Image (tube, rainbow, N blue to C red):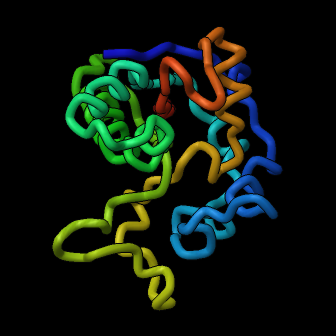
Amino acid sequence: MPFVEIEFGDIVFNPKVRSYCINSDFQCPNYAHSWACPPEAPYLEELVSQFRKFFLIYVKFDVEKYVKKIQIRHPKKSENSIRNALYMKNLLRNELENEILGFIKDYSEKFEDRLILWDGFCRLCYNDKELGCIYDSGKPCRYPNKIRYSMEAVGIDVTKSVRKLNFNLEWPPVKFLYRFGLICLK
Protein backbone atom coordinates (compact mmCIF):
# COMPACT_ATOMS: atom_id res chain seq x y z
CA MET A 1 0.00 0.00 0.00
CA PRO A 2 1.81 3.17 -1.15
CA PHE A 3 1.74 5.96 1.42
CA VAL A 4 4.02 8.43 3.13
CA GLU A 5 3.50 9.81 6.63
CA ILE A 6 4.00 13.56 6.47
CA GLU A 7 3.86 16.56 8.80
CA PHE A 8 1.34 19.37 8.66
CA GLY A 9 4.18 21.65 7.56
CA ASP A 10 4.67 19.53 4.44
CA ILE A 11 1.21 20.50 3.20
CA VAL A 12 1.28 23.67 1.09
CA PHE A 13 -1.92 25.68 1.40
CA ASN A 14 -2.75 28.54 -0.96
CA PRO A 15 -6.26 29.95 -1.50
CA LYS A 16 -5.28 30.72 -5.11
CA VAL A 17 -5.20 26.98 -5.90
CA ARG A 18 -8.99 26.96 -5.79
CA SER A 19 -9.00 29.35 -8.76
CA TYR A 20 -7.18 26.77 -10.91
CA CYS A 21 -10.56 25.09 -11.37
CA ILE A 22 -11.71 28.05 -13.44
CA ASN A 23 -9.47 30.36 -15.43
CA SER A 24 -9.09 31.71 -18.95
CA ASP A 25 -7.50 28.46 -20.19
CA PHE A 26 -9.62 25.87 -18.41
CA GLN A 27 -12.90 25.43 -16.59
CA CYS A 28 -13.51 22.20 -14.74
CA PRO A 29 -17.00 20.92 -15.56
CA ASN A 30 -17.66 20.47 -11.83
CA TYR A 31 -16.84 24.08 -10.90
CA ALA A 32 -20.05 25.61 -9.47
CA HIS A 33 -21.90 22.34 -10.13
CA SER A 34 -20.96 20.31 -7.04
CA TRP A 35 -21.21 20.75 -3.30
CA ALA A 36 -17.63 19.43 -3.03
CA CYS A 37 -16.06 21.83 -5.54
CA PRO A 38 -15.33 25.55 -5.54
CA PRO A 39 -16.90 27.93 -4.94
CA GLU A 40 -18.84 25.83 -2.36
CA ALA A 41 -15.90 23.81 -1.00
CA PRO A 42 -14.48 25.53 2.08
CA TYR A 43 -10.85 26.57 2.48
CA LEU A 44 -9.67 24.08 5.12
CA GLU A 45 -6.18 25.09 6.28
CA GLU A 46 -7.36 25.85 9.82
CA LEU A 47 -9.38 22.63 10.10
CA VAL A 48 -6.56 20.45 8.72
CA SER A 49 -4.10 22.05 11.19
CA GLN A 50 -6.16 20.57 14.05
CA PHE A 51 -5.29 16.99 13.07
CA ARG A 52 -2.16 15.27 14.40
CA LYS A 53 -1.26 12.60 11.82
CA PHE A 54 -1.14 12.95 8.06
CA PHE A 55 -0.74 10.25 5.44
CA LEU A 56 -0.30 10.98 1.77
CA ILE A 57 -1.74 8.00 -0.09
CA TYR A 58 -0.79 7.63 -3.73
CA VAL A 59 -1.05 5.56 -6.86
CA LYS A 60 1.84 5.54 -9.31
CA PHE A 61 0.76 4.66 -12.83
CA ASP A 62 3.16 3.61 -15.59
CA VAL A 63 2.02 5.76 -18.54
CA GLU A 64 4.51 4.37 -21.04
CA LYS A 65 3.46 0.78 -20.33
CA TYR A 66 -0.20 1.76 -20.61
CA VAL A 67 0.37 3.53 -23.96
CA LYS A 68 2.14 0.46 -25.39
CA LYS A 69 -0.63 -1.84 -24.19
CA ILE A 70 -3.37 0.31 -25.75
CA GLN A 71 -1.42 0.74 -29.00
CA ILE A 72 -1.28 -3.04 -29.36
CA ARG A 73 -5.04 -3.30 -28.87
CA HIS A 74 -5.89 -0.16 -30.90
CA PRO A 75 -3.10 0.54 -33.40
CA LYS A 76 -4.98 3.45 -35.01
CA LYS A 77 -5.17 5.45 -31.77
CA SER A 78 -2.65 8.22 -31.52
CA GLU A 79 -0.29 8.35 -28.58
CA ASN A 80 -1.68 11.80 -27.66
CA SER A 81 -5.23 10.51 -27.39
CA ILE A 82 -4.06 7.57 -25.31
CA ARG A 83 -2.10 9.86 -22.98
CA ASN A 84 -5.09 12.11 -22.44
CA ALA A 85 -5.70 11.93 -18.70
CA LEU A 86 -9.43 11.73 -19.25
CA TYR A 87 -9.01 8.20 -20.57
CA MET A 88 -7.27 7.13 -17.35
CA LYS A 89 -9.13 9.14 -14.73
CA ASN A 90 -11.65 6.58 -13.44
CA LEU A 91 -9.17 3.74 -13.51
CA LEU A 92 -6.76 5.70 -11.32
CA ARG A 93 -9.45 7.17 -9.09
CA ASN A 94 -10.83 3.71 -8.37
CA GLU A 95 -7.33 2.44 -7.62
CA LEU A 96 -6.67 5.41 -5.32
CA GLU A 97 -10.00 4.92 -3.56
CA ASN A 98 -9.12 1.26 -2.92
CA GLU A 99 -5.74 2.31 -1.48
CA ILE A 100 -7.35 4.92 0.80
CA LEU A 101 -10.07 2.59 2.05
CA GLY A 102 -7.52 -0.21 2.53
CA PHE A 103 -5.26 2.09 4.55
CA ILE A 104 -8.14 3.11 6.86
CA LYS A 105 -9.20 -0.52 7.29
CA ASP A 106 -5.66 -1.66 8.15
CA TYR A 107 -4.68 1.33 10.31
CA SER A 108 -4.25 -0.05 13.83
CA GLU A 109 -3.82 3.06 16.00
CA LYS A 110 -6.92 4.54 17.57
CA PHE A 111 -8.16 7.92 16.36
CA GLU A 112 -11.11 10.13 17.31
CA ASP A 113 -11.74 11.74 13.97
CA ARG A 114 -10.56 11.63 10.40
CA LEU A 115 -10.68 13.78 7.33
CA ILE A 116 -10.04 12.24 3.94
CA LEU A 117 -9.25 14.47 1.00
CA TRP A 118 -9.57 12.74 -2.35
CA ASP A 119 -8.44 13.13 -5.91
CA GLY A 120 -10.84 14.96 -8.19
CA PHE A 121 -14.52 15.57 -7.73
CA CYS A 122 -16.77 13.88 -5.15
CA ARG A 123 -18.27 10.74 -6.66
CA LEU A 124 -20.55 9.60 -3.83
CA CYS A 125 -23.73 10.37 -5.77
CA TYR A 126 -22.52 8.99 -9.09
CA ASN A 127 -24.20 5.62 -8.88
CA ASP A 128 -27.22 3.89 -10.43
CA LYS A 129 -29.59 5.26 -7.77
CA GLU A 130 -28.69 8.93 -7.51
CA LEU A 131 -27.08 9.65 -10.90
CA GLY A 132 -25.00 12.61 -9.78
CA CYS A 133 -24.67 15.57 -7.46
CA ILE A 134 -27.86 17.54 -6.82
CA TYR A 135 -26.09 20.89 -6.47
CA ASP A 136 -27.72 22.36 -9.59
CA SER A 137 -31.20 21.52 -8.26
CA GLY A 138 -30.62 23.82 -5.28
CA LYS A 139 -31.18 20.96 -2.84
CA PRO A 140 -28.64 20.38 -0.05
CA CYS A 141 -25.97 17.70 -0.35
CA ARG A 142 -27.36 14.21 0.25
CA TYR A 143 -24.28 13.20 2.26
CA PRO A 144 -22.92 16.27 4.04
CA ASN A 145 -21.03 14.10 6.56
CA LYS A 146 -19.43 11.96 3.84
CA ILE A 147 -18.72 14.61 1.20
CA ARG A 148 -15.44 14.04 -0.64
CA TYR A 149 -13.47 17.21 -1.15
CA SER A 150 -10.38 17.13 -3.31
CA MET A 151 -7.16 18.56 -1.93
CA GLU A 152 -7.18 21.36 -4.51
CA ALA A 153 -10.82 22.24 -3.77
CA VAL A 154 -9.90 23.03 -0.14
CA GLY A 155 -6.78 25.01 -1.02
CA ILE A 156 -3.92 22.49 -1.01
CA ASP A 157 -1.30 22.96 -3.69
CA VAL A 158 -0.73 19.28 -4.35
CA THR A 159 2.12 19.79 -6.82
CA LYS A 160 4.16 21.95 -4.43
CA SER A 161 3.36 19.67 -1.50
CA VAL A 162 4.50 16.46 -3.18
CA ARG A 163 7.55 18.06 -4.78
CA LYS A 164 8.67 19.05 -1.25
CA LEU A 165 8.55 15.32 -0.48
CA ASN A 166 10.84 14.55 -3.43
CA PHE A 167 8.29 12.82 -5.62
CA ASN A 168 9.60 12.87 -9.15
CA LEU A 169 6.56 14.51 -10.72
CA GLU A 170 6.46 15.10 -14.43
CA TRP A 171 4.08 17.67 -15.80
CA PRO A 172 2.71 16.75 -18.20
CA PRO A 173 3.24 13.10 -17.29
CA VAL A 174 5.65 11.29 -19.61
CA LYS A 175 6.71 8.09 -17.84
CA PHE A 176 4.59 8.07 -14.69
CA LEU A 177 1.36 9.63 -13.51
CA TYR A 178 0.50 9.97 -9.83
CA ARG A 179 -2.84 10.38 -8.06
CA PHE A 180 -2.87 11.53 -4.43
CA GLY A 181 -5.20 11.49 -1.47
CA LEU A 182 -4.63 12.78 2.06
CA ILE A 183 -5.77 11.13 5.28
CA CYS A 184 -5.77 13.38 8.37
CA LEU A 185 -6.26 11.75 11.79
CA LYS A 186 -6.65 13.03 15.36
Is there any visible trace of residue 25 in the rendered image? yes
What's the residue at 69%, 18% (across, down)?
163
x then y, percent, for residue 56? 50, 24
| Residue reaching furthest to the front | 76
Res. 39 image quadrant: bottom right
Res. 33 image quadrant: bottom right
x then y, percent, for residue 78? 43, 40
x then y, percent, for residue 52? 57, 24
Which of 80 and 140 lies nearest the eye of the viewer?
Answer: 80
Number of labels in the image equals 0
Q: Quadrant of the N terminus?
A: top left
What's the residue at 41%, 81% (across, down)?
134
Q: Horizontally, is 41 left or right of 117 in the view?
A: right
Which of 52 and 104 lies nearest the eye of the viewer?
Answer: 104
Q: Is residue 139 placed above or below 160 in the rendered structure?
A: below
Q: Horizontally, is 125 left or right of 157 in the view?
A: left
Q: Is residue 96 placed above or below 30 in the rendered structure?
A: above
x then y, percent, for residue 98? 26, 34
